Amino acid sequence: MLGTFRAVLLGTLAAAGLAAGTAQAETLRIAMNADIRSTDPGVNRDENTDTVVLHIVEGLVGYDEQGQPKPLLAEKIALSDDGRTYTFTLRDGVKFHNGAALTAADVVAAWKRYMTPALKWRCLSQFDGSGQTRIESVEAADPRTVVFHISAPSALFLSTMARPDCGGSGIYHADSLNADGSWNKPIGTGPYALAEWKQGRYVELKRFDGYSALSGPADGYVGDKTPKVDTARFVIIPDPAAARAALLAGDIEIVSDVSASDYKELQGNPAVTTASSPAMGISGLLLQTRDPLLKNPDLRLAIATALDIPALVDAVSEGLAEPNNSIVPLASPFYGAVEKRGFTHDPAKVKDLLAKAGYKGETIVMLANQRYKSMYDTAVLAQAMLQAAGINVDLSVMEWGAQLDKYLSGDYQMQAFAYSARLDPSLGFEAVSGDKDQQPRKVWDNADARTLLEKSMITSDGAERQTLFDQLHALFIADVPMIVTHNGVELAAFSSKVEGYRPWPAARPRLWMVGFKG
Amino acid sequence: MLRFVLQRVLLALPTLLLVSVTVFVLLRLVPGDPAALMLGDLADPQAVAALHADLGLDRTIGEQLLIWLGHVVRGDLGHSITNGLPVLPLILDRFSVSATIVVAAVVLATVIGVPAGLVAAWRQNGPLDLATVGTATLLLSIPSFWLGLLLLLLFGLELKWVPVVGYVPFAQDFWAALLYVILPVATLVLVEMGVLTRMARSSTLEVLRLDYITHARAKGLSEGRVLLRHALPTAFAPTLTLIGLILGNLLGGIAVVETVFTLPGLGRLMVDAIYARDYPVIQGCLLFTALVYVVVNLLVDLCYPLFDPRVAA
């Protein structure tokens, strides 16, 4: 009976063209936990959207694996002596998916659209003068040269331009827009072209045969990005257990974000290859410095000292991540000897600090959520460690949206939180530092720190920036507005038939230079 | 009959209005800002404020409610905050996926569960009855996500008989579509079959004690004829009510099953919308679900006289 059923099913499979070894071989399928929001670069977006869109469009610059902006569509970049004029020379021979050659006019047109307030481009405030930089003009000096004039020197101009959440400031052909100027679909210069977006099911990309690859090895969003498969498909699988099962069943080839426990288990499976990379996200515990209790720096330091952070990180990441108390990520080239200095677990010192702070066992409420397991685990372990040290902590577990509300309004005492990857340390410090009267979400309200941060955003000199980040780190550790625990780790699992897939610190999968063995 | 239908439809209107207002107000009381969730932790306050204004979230709840109701009356459920798509086509598209699976599952569960309950009642306290009741109790006690995962692991992963993830619409490729819905349908059949079997058994037991059944047996009718001709129609009527409730419940979204089997159905749409605080989609989904309940229950009520002549009278 079972044999007959199986025969019928396999016959049906064959009829449907789905059985193993059929024409599916040239399609590389990767799990994605939710659908994309649009195909318009940096406009209506989230991380999944950025991931897909950055396979289709490319900007003038892109991040390398150390988080440094490097030329992408630009061949070279010249900066004027006053630091206010950037001249981009475009690479020769770059074509859009429709066969048209990339010109300076395309760059100018795309940037004019980005700078239109009605578009609500994610990064408009970074370039319209609301923040550090204001673009005064974008001009095509000749068909291969684009000139940007900005209001003041900025160390972050290229970094911001390359940000994935800005859609990499991707350049697209004018035919990407409908006749009325609304967005149709991206016609970019990337290694893949958009083939089909089946909402709620998958996004399919086709190899762009006319892709003009950079020389040198693949490096973040730059380097050689040659597509190795005909079709790349991002399959929407919300449930991690289903994604894992699909990988093992051969229904997909790559899961880019497996849990630490799954990673350990899959390591022993010969059909699966695992790979990891340090990430640049910032995980830890936020302490509300305006809380009547936690405004006392000695109590905040006592909390930090009561935590055995290496043990906590070891448990949360199943031994796969390294502890780091700095806003500067471990994978950053700016992570040096100074950034290594952090908090030390010292129970004896905790008692002194608590006595100095006048702590009498008052309850501290720590917020957490179960959407992000790492945050929840961090909170549970931290609570246990703090209770053991005599600090009375209650855990309040809520839905992520509710916790984010509390974060934005500053209405909390303590919470387990994680910031997404900021590839430049200035952006990391900017995420936490600011005037709480103006922005209650800011964690660290220190005028000296803000001055140092502003300097780090202006100077482009690497040594000078390193000194500034060192000073910022020392101040941050002394103030304890947040206890950074670690940067996490990107864990990927993929079919052993696949070659070339590598996770990287920006935590967004890349399907160029990835193909099937043999 | 027409008057009855019209009466029911008119009575449904205040229900739907009440659902709309309640859902609208309750959603706004739930903590979590859609703009903040959409923009994430990288957003700056200006961007959040601009998105608030763009989404109309800077207006009072009363204004937002009136605007939304005005659109609903014209058949416009608004646009998704998350991806800008119109809500009604989005719901209908996702509902077609859920409905296909749910209707197939409920029909199969009924076809298997009701006769099983009938036979169990006929053989009350015998080995067949005990086996049927035991199996039914076991099935309805198993959470659908767990059963789904087990089926997925066995038939998808171990035996590799069916694909583990994905969905193909029947209109696109019937045979491929069949493969993708076998396991979700089987999961729902197994879970709902337990409930229906127990209900059918208990209704049949009551009916078998009635005088007209004794009379039928006294006339010398065969047991098969007594059961099928006389007991089943009357015993089926309460089960029909349960089928209506199950249908309404499942058509409103089988979020857990859809998540396990990665089906782009109504339940997953609603769960994703709740996480993203996508107000128009949540409101649209819940209003649509309420409407489905009303329609399904109306249809069940209209079917009642077919099985129980007392109702028609």
Image (cartoon, helix red, strand yellow):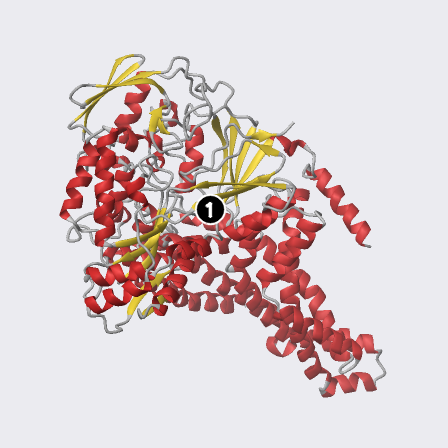
Work out whether A202 lies above or below B310: above
Seen as rendered, the residue at the extreme top is A142
Work out whether B311 lies above or below A73: below
Type of residue at label 1? Ala
Q: Is residue A8 left or right of residue B60?
A: right
Subunit that carries the residue with mark 1? A
Between A255 and B204, the residue placed more toward the observer is A255
Between A364 and A32, the residue placed more toward the observer is A364
Question: Judging from the image, what secondary structure is the residue with disc 1 in?
Answer: loop
Work out whether B62 lies above or below B49: below
Tell me the quadrant of the picture where the C terminus of chain A can be found.
Answer: top right
Would you identify the image quadrant in which residue A169 lies?
Answer: top left
Which residue shows up at 59% across the image and 47% down it?
A266
Which residue shows up at 77% across the image and 79% down it?
B122
Q: Is residue B192 left or right of residue B88?
A: right
Which residue shows up at 37% across the image and 34% down it?
A40
Q: Is residue A175 left or right of residue B258?
A: left
Q: Circle 1 sits on which residue?
A: A34
The x, y position of residue A320, in whole percent, is 48, 48
The x, y position of residue A374, in whole percent, is 42, 54
Would you identify the image quadrant in which residue B210 lies?
Answer: bottom right
